[in-house]
Image (tube, rainbow, N blue to C red):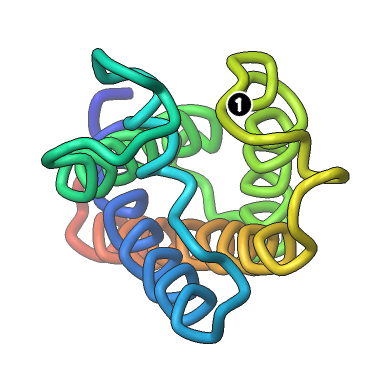
Amino acid sequence: MLRNVMKGALGGTAATATMSLVMMAGSRMGLMPDQPPKRIVRAMLPGHRHRPKRGESVAGALAHFGFGITAGSLYGLLTRGRDTPAPLGAGYALAIWFSSYEGWVPQLGILPPARRDRRGRMAVMIAGHLVYGTTLALTLNRLNARTAGSGQP
């Protein structure tokens, strides 16, 4: 069980890194003026929730990786060391996107629900989550193959 959680954490790290590239590209293309992880951290830090705060970019990146690693660990636990098709990983990530951007993020007043947010941000975040989930599944499959090839349980 712990081995699957750890593999999931590694997969979550790789998946968050690739997702971050999609998000940075979306920002550079002008589709998303600021990053949702930074907005989430801004709302959680003391002071006015909509004004930029010192250190929020670094804190946002750390929070994003922490969330991605945790979600990857959960996926590793749920899949129990079995290979999964990339579409299953993508579906898992879309469920995270939906529950976040139609659920707790708007409930906390951080961003509007995705259906009422900027279309560009919604498109970038959906694409980013698809990349996250696909990368997560493929990375875990590769880690599972290495473990199977080494004779370890």
Q: Quadrant of residue 131?
A: bottom right
From what the image shows, is residue 132 above or below residue 99? below
**145 or 11, which is in the foreground?**
11
Residue 118 picture location, percent across and down = 74, 57
Residue 150 picture location, percent across and down = 18, 60
**Residue drawn at (77%, 44%), measured in percent from left and top?**
114
Residue 105 visible in the displayed image: yes
**13 or 42, which is in the foreground?**
42
Residue 4 visible in the displayed image: no
**98 or 4, which is in the foreground?**
98
From what the image shows, is residue 20 above or below residue 48? below
Q: Quadrant of residue 47?
A: top left
- Residue named by callout 1: 105
Name the residue type under label 1: Val
- The number of discs equals 1
The quadrant the N terminus occupies is top left
**Residue drawn at (85%, 44%), measured in percent from left and top?**
116
Farthest residue in the bottom direction? 29
Apparent side of residue 95 relative to residue 42 in the rendered image (left or right): right
From what the image shows, is residue 131 above or below residue 55? below
Apparent side of residue 49 relative to residue 91 in the rendered image (left or right): left
Element under disc 1: helix
Circle 1 Cα neighbour tier, 10 Å, few/some/many (<14 / 14–19 / ≥20)? some
**Residue drawn at (69%, 60%), measured in percent from left and top?**
126
**Residue drawn at (62%, 20%), measured in percent from left and top?**
109
Residue 50 picture location, percent across and down = 44, 31
Residue 7 picture location, percent across and down = 28, 45
Apparent side of residue 131 relative to residue 39 in the rendered image (left or right): right
The quadrant the C terminus occupies is top left
